[in-house]
Amino acid sequence: MMPIEILLLLVIGFSGGIAVGAGFVAFLTVLGIIPRLTQLTRTKKYIRFYEVAIILGSMISAWLSLRDHTLEIPSFSLIILGLFFGVFVGMLAAALTEVLNVLPILAKRIGVHEKIVYLLMAIVFGKMIGSLFHWLFYVYL
């Protein structure tokens, strides 16, 4: 590879990481996911553990996504992992349900409250098109 191609690849990769990281941080901080989760579960005294778990989980998953690792674990431990993943997805779905209450307020503040249907349809169609692209093109490449 040419040095300019390597430099361009580094810039694009770094920019993509910054964009995804900023979106993730905005999702957690602006929408108040962690404080709301601690409020709902009445575990406010463990908020530092939530923060550390999110930071470590993000760092470890980012590192693992750059590697080609296979975990050799016993079959019975998959039940425990599946339980943890199910709890995570369930709590994330509950948090997203709470976030949907924020959309009308956000639309009113930025002055597009009469176009809230278009905002919701953009989110729905964006997720649908992204999912179709992933499953129809990316998976088979």
Image (spheres, rainbow, N blue to C red):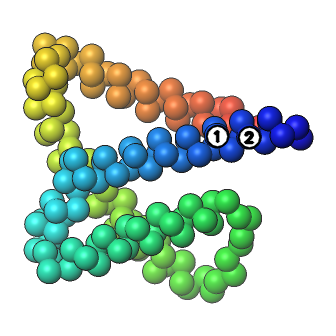
Q: Is residue 52 left or right of residue 96?
A: right
Q: How crowded is the residue under tag 2: few (<14 C-alpha within 10 Å), some, or many (20+)?
A: few
Residue at the disc numbered 1: 11
- The vertical placement of 27 against 88, above or below, is above
Q: Residue furthest right?
A: 1
Tell me if I can see residue 4 in this picture.
Answer: yes
- Which of the labelled discs sits on residue 2, or is there none? none
In the rendered picture of this protein, how many numbered marks are placed on residues? 2
Q: x and y percent of residue 47 in the render? A: 21, 74
- What residue is drawn where x is 64% and y is 40%? 11
Asked whether the residues under the numbered discs 2 and 1 touch, taking CB atoms below 8 Å apart as contact, a structural biologist would say yes
Q: Name the amino acid, label 2.
A: Leu
Q: Hey, which quadrant is residue 106 in on the image?
A: top left
Q: Is residue 112 above or below residue 139?
A: above
Task: Name the residue: 50% across, 26% down.
Answer: 129
Please state if 135 lies on the left or on the right of 7 as rendered: left
Cα gap from disc 2 to disc 1, whole angstroms: 6 Å
Q: Is residue 29 above or below residue 129?
A: below
Image coordinates of residue 97 in percent, x first then y, are 21, 46
Q: Categorize mark 1 by other alpha carbons within 10 Å: few (<14), some (14-19), many (20+).
A: few
Q: Which residue is mark 2?
A: 7
Q: Where is residue 19? Give x, y as percent.
A: 47, 41
In screen coordinates, is 130 left or right of 8?
left
Asked whether the viewer can see residue 139, the reply is no
At label 1, the amino acid type is Val
Q: Provide the secondary structure element on which disc 2 rests.
A: helix
| Extreme-top residue of the structure | 114
Q: From the image, which quarter does the N terminus lie in?
A: top right
Q: Residue at x 64, y 83 (%)?
A: 73
Secondary structure beneath disc 1?
helix
Q: Nearer the viewer, residue 29 or 72?
A: 29
Where does the C terminus fall, quadrant-wise?
Answer: top right
